[in-house]
Image (spheres, helix red, strand yellow):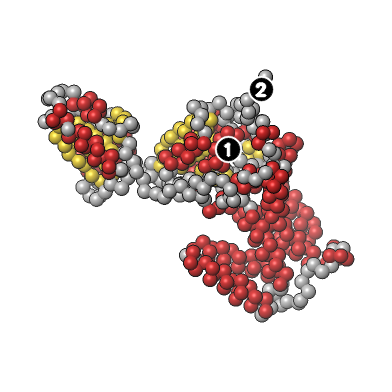
């Protein structure tokens, strides 16, 4: 690493060659003369709070009126900086990294030290409730694209001196800030070390896709469609998992936080369950479980009964298409399922004022006319729509897409092998999930391996005063949630 030159002319030349000072309009230098010595400010417009810089400049300019000539100008400047975050660095690489991150570098002629002042003010939005994790009652603040705001929202909820946020930079060009959040006397130190080591070994130009790219390096997911980490945009959800012993990964420019380790059942939890009474929360949880099951097995099961009516008892003989169609039922199911995916993608890309009109077109024109012309039988539309509703009822978007792929594979097994295919498909699906491990954590815990008490807590939302033990899957150092009274 190149040490900081004593000559500010050499520093300016280096900044011109290295970061394009003078070529890029948003890079700037402010030159002052203090006690007959040159002082330079290096900054990036748009990433700095201009008002802070103006106040610092005012205070430093006043040195000429209030101080005599001194050889200790560096110390005088450092003492006069009106800011709580001032750091000394001794290499040009550190200066460049800090300036490009939105901090300012102050250098004094003849000194081989730069003063780094944190006056960052990143452009962004205010904390607001995330669209995918809304609750009827509860906080309306959520994470944003600023890592400083996100860690502050978490620390506001956990005012514990043992809460740690270890920051590092990843990406040769992007130099993205990543913070590792955990509670020191709760989180498993081996887990913290594994995640930290994995993050530090990431070698890539940049993390423009932020947390998703980090996830692919962290858990080596490959083409596995099921999520191995959980995302949340709610600060209260993140704080709850920290208290359970999880380790969180905060990535700058991303409004989502990565929760590790997680299991299949972590993706089925929602904050709404804990904003209601235990009884209501349990009911909501079971309805959600039913919705997930519907999204996965309803279509294959209906197709099995529609093609093999003799499997149904007399009371359920009405199940199955009553009208003949020129298009095979299996093809109708796939076409309808793909059509719903078209509508989902269109809803994402359609401006909000036009989304209502698009919904009317989909429901009235496409759906009804497709039935009238004989492209689909009504029951296909009904069951595909129910499966889609179950997909949207899944709290985790990533899990819902994984279950959708699982449903397609199960439907193909059922179409080819009928009853044995359905049974074998379900068995293979469970075995596959049981074989997945995320950061050495069984994906189907506490179902496989079976942990009775933990599985009971999955099925029944327990009251907070009765939940005195942290989940064993995180291997917390301190298992007790609440102080033990003598």
At horizontal 76% and vertical 63% (from top left) the residue drawn is 302
Q: Nearer the viewer, residue 318 or 220?
A: 318
Label 1 SS: helix
- The residue lying furthest to the bottom in this view is 373
Q: Can residue 449 be seen by looking at this rendering?
A: no
Occupied quadrant, residue 173: top left
Percent position of residue 75, x then y:
23, 25
Q: Residue at x 48, y 35 (%)?
A: 155
In the figure, is residue 184 to the left or right of 478?
left
Return the x and y of residue 82 as percentages of the image width and height: 27, 32
Q: Answer with mark 1 or mark 2, whichever residue precedes in sequence.
A: 1
Drawn side of residue 117 relative to residue 39, left or right: right
**Residue furthest out toward the top:** 486
Q: Please tell me whether residue 276 is drawn above or below residue 110 in the rendered image.
A: below
Q: How many neighbours does mark 2 have within 10 angstroms: few (below 14), some (14-19), or many (20 or more)? A: few
Could you say which disc has been placed on residue 240 in the image?
1
Residue 189 marker: none
In the image, residue 248 sits, relative to residue 131, either above or below, namely: above
Label at residue 485:
2
Going by the image, does 347 lie left or right of 392? left
* Residue farthest to the right, as pictured: 314
Q: Position of residue 398 (x, y in %)?
A: 58, 51
Asked whether the beta carbons under mark 1 and mark 2 sit within 8 Å of each other, the answer is no
Question: Which dot, 1 or 2, sits closer to the camera?
Answer: 2
**Residue 354 seen in the figure:** yes
Kindly state the secondary structure of the residue where label 2 is placed.
loop
- Name which quarter of the figure residue 114 lies in: top left
Q: For mark 1, does the 10 Å Cα neighbourhood hold few (<14), some (14 to 19), or many (20 or more) residues?
A: some
């Amino acid at each position: 690493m190149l040490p900081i030159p004593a000559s500010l002319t050499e520093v300016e030349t280096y900044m011109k060659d290295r970061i394009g000072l003078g070529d890029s309009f948003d890079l700037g230098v402010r030159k002052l003369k203090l006690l007959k010595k040159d002082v330079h400010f290096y900054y990036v417009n748009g990433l700095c709070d201009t008002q802070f810089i103006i106040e610092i400049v005012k205070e430093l300019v006043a040195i000429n009126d209030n101080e005599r000539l001194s050889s200790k100008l560096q110390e005088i400047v450092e003492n006069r900086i009106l800011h709580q975050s001032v750091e000394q660095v001794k290499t040009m690489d550190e200066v460049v990294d800090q300036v490009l991150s939105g901090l300012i570098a102050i250098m004094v002629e003849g000194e081989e030290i730069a003063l780094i002042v944190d006056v960052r003010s990143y452009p962004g939005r205010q904390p607001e409730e995330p669209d995918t994790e809304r609750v009827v009652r509860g906080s309306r603040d959520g994470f944003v694209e600023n890592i400083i705001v996100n860690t502050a929202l978490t620390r506001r909820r956990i005012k514990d001196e043992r809460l740690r946020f270890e920051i590092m930079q990843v990406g040769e060009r992007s130099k993205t800030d990543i913070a590792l959040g955990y509670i020191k006397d709760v989180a498993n130190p081996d887990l913290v070390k594994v995640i930290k080591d994995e993050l530090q070994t990431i070698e890539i130009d940049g993390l423009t896709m932020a947390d998703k790219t980090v996830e692919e390096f962290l858990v080596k997911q490959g083409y596995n469609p099921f999520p191995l980490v959980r995302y949340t945009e709610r600060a209260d959800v993140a704080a709850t998992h920290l208290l359970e012993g999880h380790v969180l990964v905060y990535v700058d420019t991303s409004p989502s936080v990565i929760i590790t380790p997680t299991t299949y059942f972590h993706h089925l939890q929602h904050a709404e369950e804990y904003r209601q009474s235990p009884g209501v929360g349990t009911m909501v949880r079971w309805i959600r479980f039913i919705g997930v099951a519907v999204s996965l097995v309803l279509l294959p099961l209906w197709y099995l009964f529609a093609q093999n009516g003799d499997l149904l008892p007399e009371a359920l003989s009405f199940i199955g298409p009553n009208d003949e169609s020129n298009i095979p039922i299996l093809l109708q199911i796939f076409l309808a399922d793909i059509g719903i995916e078209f509508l989902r993608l269109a809803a994402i890309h359609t401006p909000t004022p036009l989304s209502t009109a698009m919904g009317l077109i989909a429901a009235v024109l496409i759906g009804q006319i497709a039935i009238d012309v004989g492209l689909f039988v009504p029951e296909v539309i009904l069951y595909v729509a129910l499966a889609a509703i179950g997909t949207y009822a899944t709290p985790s978007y990533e899990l819902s897409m994984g279950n959708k792929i699982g449903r397609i594979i199960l439907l193909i097994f059922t179409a080819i092998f009928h009853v044995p295919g359905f049974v074998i498909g379900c068995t293979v699906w469970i075995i596959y999930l049981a074989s997945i491990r995320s950061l050495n954590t069984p994906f189907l815990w506490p179902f496989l391996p079976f942990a009775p008490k933990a599985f009971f807590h999955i099925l029944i939302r327990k009251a907070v005063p009765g939940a005195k033990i942290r989940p064993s899957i995180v291997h917390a150092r301190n298992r007790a949630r609440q102080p033990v009274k003598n």
